[in-house]
Amino acid sequence: MAALSNADRALVVQLIMRNHDQRSLPCGITKAELRAAVNAADDWADTNAGAYNTALPLPARTTLSAAQKGFLLAYVVVRRAGG
Amino acid sequence: MASGNTLCRFHPAAYEPAATNFPVPGVRNNHPTLDFDPITQQTCYFTDVLPKAYSGGGLTLRVRWMAASATSGDCVWLSAIERIDAGTLDTDADSFASDQTVTTTTNGASGISVESVMTFTSGAAMDSLAAGETFRLRLERDADVGGDSMTGNAQLVSAVLEET
């Protein structure tokens, strides 16, 4: 799964800001700084996608689709963040 | 009217949305707000009548707003006046004077409002609006300009026009 496009990264920024507003989460960085953080997170995910895949046990590693593995990680991380 | 006296007051509930890309009403701890997006420039209007007590000294617009979640960053506002002089203006087309603009840093606490001030000198800058005439005030957050760095919505609390 390739890194996100510019449009998708911009959409992620919008979604994060909306989440902050709806949940009244204080945000002490600017729009440009938030975009830089999103870029870095996406780059990290792209760089470490192979390592994540290797960390998954069988049969999940070979049976689940890339999208399913992505959602799996997303749900785990969101839950860890209190979501 | 003396300098600093209030001429017109604008409340979020009295806004008139643009046909597209307009702010949306919100509420914050039961305080009505008008929420301006952080990405897309959004436009609204307010219609009022300039009091006959206006002395001709120009107008000062004070926009009171707060950040929905941001605790840093700048918000850029634009405003313009359209004189609706009876017998002259064809309201089928917009006829606003040039925008005034101001950049304001949000408060370090998102629920605390700040004030952004824009002035319209007497004459063309306020579309030559005269005392007793109807007018529209156009208010926008210039969210897509580089100087608008604040994340999240800008929530309008109120706006006031004063004699400068």
Image (cartoon, coloured by chain):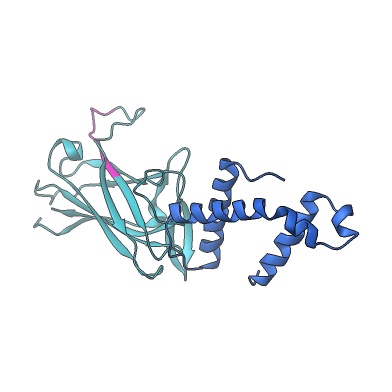
Chain colours: A blue, B cyan
Q: Is residue B128 visible?
A: no
Q: Tell me if B138 is positioned left or right of B50 in this view.
A: right
Comparing A47 with B139, the one in front is A47
Is B124 magenta? The answer is no
Q: Residue at x 48, y 38 (%)?
A: B20
Residue B42 percent across, percent down from the top left: 42, 44
Give the residue displayed 33% in from the left and 50% down from the top: B76
Number of numbered tags placed on the structure image = 0
Can the viewer see residue A34?
yes
User: Is A16 placed left or right of B134 in the picture?
Assistant: right
Per the rendered image, the range of residues in magenta is B79-89
Q: Quadrant of residue B160?
A: bottom left
Left or right of A50? Residue B97 is: left
Query: Can you say whether B21 is above or below B11 in the image?
Result: above
Q: Position of residue B39 (x, y in %)?
A: 46, 47
Q: Quadrant of the N terminus of chain B?
A: bottom left
Tell me, yes or no, whether the highlighted magenta stretch contains residue B86. yes
Residue at the (20%, 36%) spot, across then down: B127
Question: With respect to residue B60, does B91 lie above or below?
Answer: above
Relative to residue B105, is residue B144 depicted above or below? above
Q: Position of residue B49 (x, y in %)?
A: 24, 46
Q: Which of B143/B98 is in front?
A: B143
Residue A55: x %, y % from top left:
79, 62
- Viewer-proximal residue, B160 or A65? A65
